[in-house]
Every structure is written in structure tokens, then in C-alpha cells.
Image (tube, helix red, strand yellow):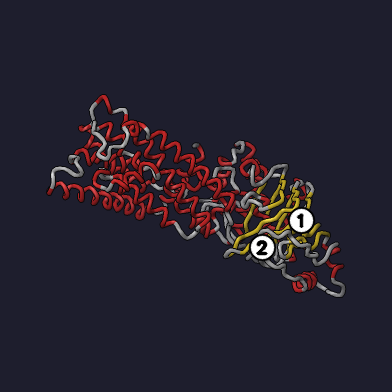
């Protein structure tokens, strides 16, 4: 469902080329639930942005739902749902219901399918009480449920979430998590999320990708991730240990061939 | 097209939430632009011609350039706010929708207040129309459409530049707002070098000057070839093509923001 081959993106910062994502190769099958971990600035968001067509890769390629995100961005938009925890795609001054109606029109979703899907999501995510409230008056938890709904109204095969639980309280977090688990189990939607919340990973992800300094540092199950650092009790400690033991890759000059910096750990 | 109207209408509804600000902005935009006209009026209380053109003829130039610019600004001018959207990260959310980001940017924040400038320019053009002979009136809608395309292309070029220089929207303003001021007077009041520049490099002379020479039956004061007065559609298409390529190159180069 998601496939990348040597996916790379450089950024030019004051004349030097900084590789934000370097030689990323992985596959995510249909129906998988994958969590993407990594310290701040590791390249998680850059990866997500390349997979959703926001950023064009410098080298390598990606295929999502059989489409090249950079070249077939509009076609891809109809097949995937994207949620940014840090910013909303809803219309600030309009009632939540109107944002959904706009999604229906922009994604050209059939009216009866839309009605059925919205009714279902309203029930599961408990949106009934604030469908007519302007988005600017919603709490963060309500807004996030609204954003998740907006991303799913066109019934995408893949759902990509960038820090969906950031800033949410325990209850709101639990609601979003149980919803995502259900979506994945019942509809078979492929889910890829980035997070700093290891609760998300433990409760939801059957597979973890650890990105560090723009490289794939680990790819395996949560149990395998734990096994990497024996003697650590919590998953937090395991991940902290992995983040701390990583070494930065030096910025490259444009023409030099990429050196084979060994990944920190492999499963 | 459908998507544009849909988004524009949504923004009008959203902005209707702030009714007072809506009324104030429509009135102030009308008033600011009316000052321009008063300035021309004052000039003509002292002289009878400006660069060899009568008051009505100058009003014709002002009106056609103004209407073209006001339409381009109303429909697509918001594209120049790209750098704000890049910095706020909202451009990312436009790229994940199945609608061209150009259309989303153009419609973003659409408000009826943008009609203020258009109304004022249209009134001036209406007053100037008696100078247009019937047999040459067909050129008026042609020049307005070409003008809209040229100004939109200039807006788009300015926006495309912001993909590279996020902090440089002002540079683009020199060509858009500077451009409209330039087209509001007969180019014969400017120097020959400038006129050649806006004919062959940034083709602002085709917004109204060249076609107006035909409409008003005037020889070119700078002696440029006569076929140029019919070249507005060609100039508009060329510039639109360049702008479209620049926009696409800009999207490929887009860097987004951190996080």
C-alpha cells in the first residue's frame, strides 16, 4: 500500500545541503497499522510530507496506493486521508457540519454515501453535540475528532496522521486511539502515524519504524523494539536510550556520493 | 472553475460573520481608489492634454487598466499571500486536497470587499466610453480580458518567486501594483526605455496602451511597429505560459515548514 525506494530529501540551508531524509526504503502492506517514531528533526514529518505529495523527493521514489505522490497528487488526495495534529484542515469560522459538506463537494463524494458515512462517524466519534458549532469554538479534542472525520469522509484506503494525539487530554486521546484501532480492524484501512506518544505506539501499532537522522534505524514489532535494549522497564526508556545513542550524520556536499553510514540498530 | 466558485462562496459566508469589517473595507477600498481619479481631475484643471491625450482618453486608459487589474486582483490576487500561507503551514493543507493549490490560493479569503476597486474603475471606464468609435468597440472586451490574464500572470510569477524567497512578496508588488499605476496613464508621459521594457520584457504595455492606440486611432508616439496593437492576446498567452511553468517549478521546490 505504501512503498518507498531510496526515498531522500535534501534541504539547502545557507548553501550547504542538509539531508533531511536519506535513502529510506520500506514497505507497508494493506491493512497494516504502523507507527513512525523518531526524535524531533529526525525526518518523520518530511517523510510523511513526501508520502502525501506535499514535498517532492530529491532522490528515490515513493508509491502510495499505487500512485506517485509528487506527480499524481490530486489523484492520490482522493485515495488517502491526512490528519495534521498541529494544524486543522477545517474552516475556522464555519460550523463543523459546513466543513464536512465542503469536503463532500471538493472530493466529489456521492450524496448518499456521504450521508451514511457522516452518520456513522458522528455516532462513533460522538460529534452530534457540536456539528453546528463554528470550528473556532471547539475544544482541541473536539476539533481533532472533526479533523479525523473530515479525513475519512471520502473513505480513503490509507490514513496518514502526523502527531494526531498531540496536546490531547487522556480521555480525548483514548477516544481517538480506540477509534483508529476500530477503523483499522473493521474497515481494513491502512494507518501510518507519527507520534512522540509511546502510548499510541504500544496500544495501536503492530509495527514500528524508527527514523533517526533521516535514516531508517529500526523496523519491527514493539516487542522487537523492547528487546533491543535489555533491562529497560518501560518503552519510554527503551526509546530514550535509542535516541541518545544515535550519532548525527554529517551534512554532505552536493556531489559527494552518500557514504554508507551504518544504521544504529537493525532488527 | 466549479471548485473556485465553491471555495469563494464559502469564504464569503465565512467573512459575513464579521459584518462591520466587511462594510468598512468595501467603502474604504472605494474611497482610496476614488482619490486616484480626483488626482487625474486636478491635473486636467491645469492642462488640457496629458502626454498628448485628452481627459476622456486618459480616463479610457485609466478605466481599462483599472478594470483589468481589479478583476485580476479580485479573482486571483490573493495568490500573492502565498508566503503567509507557507509560513503558517496552511499551504500544506491545500496540497492534500484534490483541488489545484492555485485555485485554493486564489479563492482563499475571497470577500465581496474586493468589488470596491472594480466598481470605481468601471465607473471611470463607463464615463470614458463615448471616445470609443463603434467600429472599434470590439477591442475593449478583448483588451480587458488580455489585461486580466497579464496581471494574473504577473501575480502568479510573484507568488512563484515566494517559493524560493519566502520573505520577498514586496518585489512582486512592484510589478503588480506598480504595473497598474503605470497602465493608468498614457505611456507617452514616460521615457522611451521604460516603454520598450514594458512592451518587450514585462508586457504591461499590452494591458491597455497598445490596444488603446488602435481603439483611439492614434499613431504610436514611440514609433513601435503597428502590428503590436493587435498583439495583446499573444503577449497574454506567452506570459501566462511562463507564469504556469514558474508556478509548477515553485511547487516542486516547495520546502514546507518544520514539524
* Left or right placement of residue B18 versus residue B97 in this view: left
Is residue B141 visible in the rendered image? The answer is no
Instruction: Return the chain for callout 2.
Output: A
Viewer-proximal residue among A50 and A8: A8
Find the distance from the CA under tag 1 to the CA under tag 2: 33 Å
Number of numbered markers: 2
Quadrant hosting residue A231: bottom right
Residue A205 lies, in percent from the top left, at 78, 58
* Left or right placement of residue A245 versus residue B147 in this view: right
Viewer-side label of 1, 2: 2
The structure residue drawn at horizontal position 87% and vertical position 67%, both measured from the top left corner, is A227
The structure residue drawn at horizontal position 48% and vertical position 44%, both measured from the top left corner, is B243
* Left or right placement of residue A64 versus residue B252 in this view: right
Is residue B243 visible in the rendered image? The answer is yes
Q: Which mark is residue A34?
A: 1
* Left or right placement of residue B179 versus residue A257 in this view: left
Instruction: Return the chain for callout 1.
Output: A
The structure residue drawn at horizontal position 27% and vertical position 31%, both measured from the top left corner, is B215
Residue B122 lies, in percent from the top left, at 28, 40
In the rendered image, the vertical position of residue A190 relative to residue B63, given as above or below: below
Q: Quadrant of the C terminus of chain B?
A: bottom right
Residue A254 lies, in percent from the top left, at 66, 59
Viewer-proximal residue among B134 and B192: B192
Residue A80 lies, in percent from the top left, at 67, 46
The structure residue drawn at horizontal position 78% and vertical position 70%, both measured from the top left corner, is A242
Viewer-proximal residue among B5 and B152: B152
Q: Secondary structure at mark 1?
A: strand
Residue with the mark numbered 2? A253
- For disc 2, the neighbor class at 10 Å (few under 14, some 14 to 19, many from 20) is few
Q: Secondary structure at mark 2?
A: loop
- For disc 1, the neighbor class at 10 Å (few under 14, some 14 to 19, many from 20) is many
Mark 1 or mark 2: name the one nearer the start of the chain. Answer: 1
Amino acid at each position: 500500500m505504501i512503498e518507498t525506494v531510496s526515498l531522500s530529501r535534501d534541504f539547502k540551508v545557507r548553501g550547504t545541503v542538509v539531508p533531511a531524509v536519506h535513502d529510506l526504503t520500506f514497505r507497508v502492506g494493506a491493512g497494516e497499522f504502523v507507527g513512525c517514531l523518531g526524535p524531533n528533526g529526525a525526518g518523520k514529518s518530511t517523510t510523511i510530507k513526501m508520502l502525501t505529495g506535499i514535498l517532492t523527493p530529491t532522490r528515490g521514489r515513493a508509491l502510495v496506493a499505487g500512485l506517485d505522490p509528487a506527480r499524481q497528487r490530486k489523484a492520490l488526495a482522493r485515495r488517502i486521508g491526512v490528519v495534521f495534529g498541529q494544524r486543522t484542515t477545517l474552516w475556522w469560522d464555519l460550523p463543523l457540519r459546513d466543513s464536512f459538506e465542503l469536503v463532500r463537494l471538493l472530493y466529489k463524494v456521492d450524496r448518499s454515501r456521504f450521508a451514511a458515512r457522516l452518520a456513522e462517524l458522528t455516532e462513533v466519534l460522538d460529534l452530534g453535540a457540536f456539528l453546528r458549532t463554528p470550528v473556532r469554538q471547539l475544544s482541541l479534542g473536539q476539533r481533532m475528532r472533526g479533523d479525523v472525520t473530515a479525513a475519512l469522509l471520502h473513505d480513503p484506503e490509507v490514513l496518514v496522521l502526523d502527531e494526531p494525539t498531540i496536546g490531547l487530554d487522556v480521555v480525548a486521546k483514548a477516544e481517538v486511539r480506540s477509534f483508529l484501532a476500530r477503523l483499522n480492524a473493521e474497515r481494513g484501512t491502512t494507518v501510518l502515524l507519527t507520534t512522540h506518544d509511546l502510548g499510541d505506539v504500544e496500544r495501536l501499532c503492530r509495527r514500528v519504524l524508527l527514523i533517526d537522522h533521516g535514516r531508517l534505524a529500526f523496523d519491527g514489532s514493539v516487542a522487537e523494539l523492547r528487546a533491543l535494549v535489555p533491562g529497560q522497564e518501560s518503552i519510554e526508556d527503551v526509546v530514550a536510550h535509542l535516541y541518545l545513542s544515535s550519532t548525527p550524520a554529517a551534512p554532505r556536499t552536493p556531489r559527494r556520493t552518500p557514504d554508507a553510514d551504518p544504521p544504529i540498530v537493525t532488527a | 472553475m466549479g471548485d473556485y466558485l465553491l471555495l469563494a462562496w464559502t469564504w464569503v459566508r465565512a467573512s459575513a460573520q464579521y459584518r462591520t469589517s466587511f462594510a468598512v473595507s468595501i467603502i474604504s477600498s472605494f474611497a482610496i481608489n476614488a482619490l486616484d481619479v480626483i488626482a487625474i481631475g486636478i491635473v486636467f484643471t491645469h492642462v488640457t492634454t496629458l502626454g498628448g491625450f485628452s481627459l476622456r482618453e486618459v480616463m479610457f486608459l485609466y478605466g481599462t487598466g483599472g478594470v483589468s487589474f481589479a478583476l485580476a486582483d479580485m479573482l486571483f490576487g490573493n495568490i500573492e499571500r502565498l508566503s503567509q500561507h507557507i509560513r503558517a503551514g496552511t499551504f500544506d493543507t491545500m496540497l492534500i486536497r484534490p483541488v489545484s493549490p492555485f485555485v485554493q490560493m486564489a479563492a482563499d479569503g475571497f470577500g465581496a470587499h474586493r468589488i470596491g476597486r472594480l466598481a470605481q474603475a468601471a465607473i471611470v471606464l463607463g464615463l470614458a466610453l463615448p471616445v470609443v468609435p463603434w467600429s472599434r468597440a470590439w477591442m475593449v472586451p478583448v483588451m480587458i480580458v488580455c489585461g486580466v490574464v497579464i496581471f494574473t500572470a504577473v501575480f502568479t510569477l510573484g507568488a512563484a518567486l515566494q517559493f524560493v524567497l519566502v520573505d520577498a512578496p514586496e518585489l512582486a508588488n512592484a510589478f503588480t501594483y506598480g504595473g497598474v499605476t503605470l497602465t493608468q496613464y498614457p505611456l507617452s508621459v514616460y521615457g522611451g526605455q521604460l516603454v520598450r521594457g514594458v512592451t518587450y520584457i514585462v508586457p504591461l504595455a499590452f494591458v491597455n496602451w497598445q490596444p488603446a492606440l488602435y481603439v483611439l486611432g492614434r499613431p504610436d508616439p514611440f514609433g513601435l511597429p503597428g502590428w503590436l496593437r493587435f498583439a495583446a492576446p499573444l503577449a497574454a498567452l506567452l506570459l501566462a505560459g511562463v507564469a504556469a511553468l514558474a508556478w509548477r517549478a515553485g511547487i516542486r521546490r516547495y520546502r514546507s515548514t518544520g514539524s
